[in-house]
Image (cartoon, helix red, strand yellow):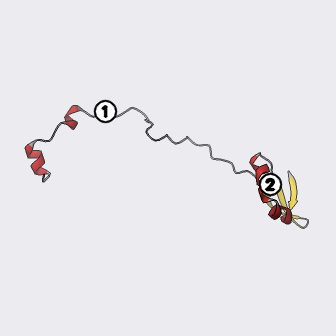
Amino acid sequence: MSTITTHQAKTHLSRYLAEVEKGHEFMIARGQKVVAMLMPVKKPRGKPRPMAGEIKGKPFEFSLEALAPLSAEELKNWGL
């Protein structure tokens, strides 16, 4: 872990961020006093989200009756 000054951090932030992405950590000091740390963000380890269209669990199947056309009375009840 390296210590850098606030001036170095401001002047070369992109360079330090590239190093942080590789896993390095930096202590940022104002004068002789360390005031902050620049370190990689730890990513949460959860279950990955399913991709769009990916089936989770058992697929649901519609019965043929659900796809049958509505009767005249059912259409009347729906106001059609």
Disc 2 from disc 1: Cα separation: 55 Å
Q: Secondary structure at mark 2?
A: helix
Residue 12 lies left or right of residue 74; in this view the side is: right
Give neighbour class at mark 1: few <14, some 14-19, many 20+ (Cα, 10 Å). few
Residue 61: mark in rendering:
1
Indicate which disc residue 15 carries: 2
Q: Residue at x 91, y 65 (%)?
A: 32
Q: Nearer the viewer, mark 2 or mark 1?
A: 2
Please tell me which residue lies in front, 58 or 69.
69
Q: Secondary structure at mark 1?
A: loop
Query: Could you tell me residue 49's position as x and y percent?
Result: 52, 42
In the rendered image, is residue 35 in sight?
Answer: no
Total number of numbered discs in the rendering: 2
Q: Is residue 67 left or right of residue 12?
A: left
Q: Disc 2 or 1, which lies upstream in sequence?
A: 2
Residue 10 in which image quadrant? bottom right
Residue type marked 1: Glu
- Residue 67: tell me if it is visible: yes
Three-letter amino acid code at the position of disc 2: Arg
Crowdedness of circle 2 by 10 Å Cα count: few (<14), some, many (20+)? few
Residue 38 in picture, x, y percent from top left: 78, 56
Q: Is residue 76 left or right of residue 41?
A: left
**Is 54 placed above or below 40 here?**
above
Image coordinates of residue 12 in percent, x first then y, are 82, 59
Q: Residue at x 19, y 34 (%)?
A: 65
Q: Is residue 19 above or below residue 36?
A: above
Residue located 45% across and 37% down the image: 54
Q: What is the x, y in percent for residue 41?
A: 70, 51
**Marks 2 and 1 close (CB-CB < 8 Å):** no
Residue for point 83% across, 57% down: 27
Q: Residue furthest right?
A: 32
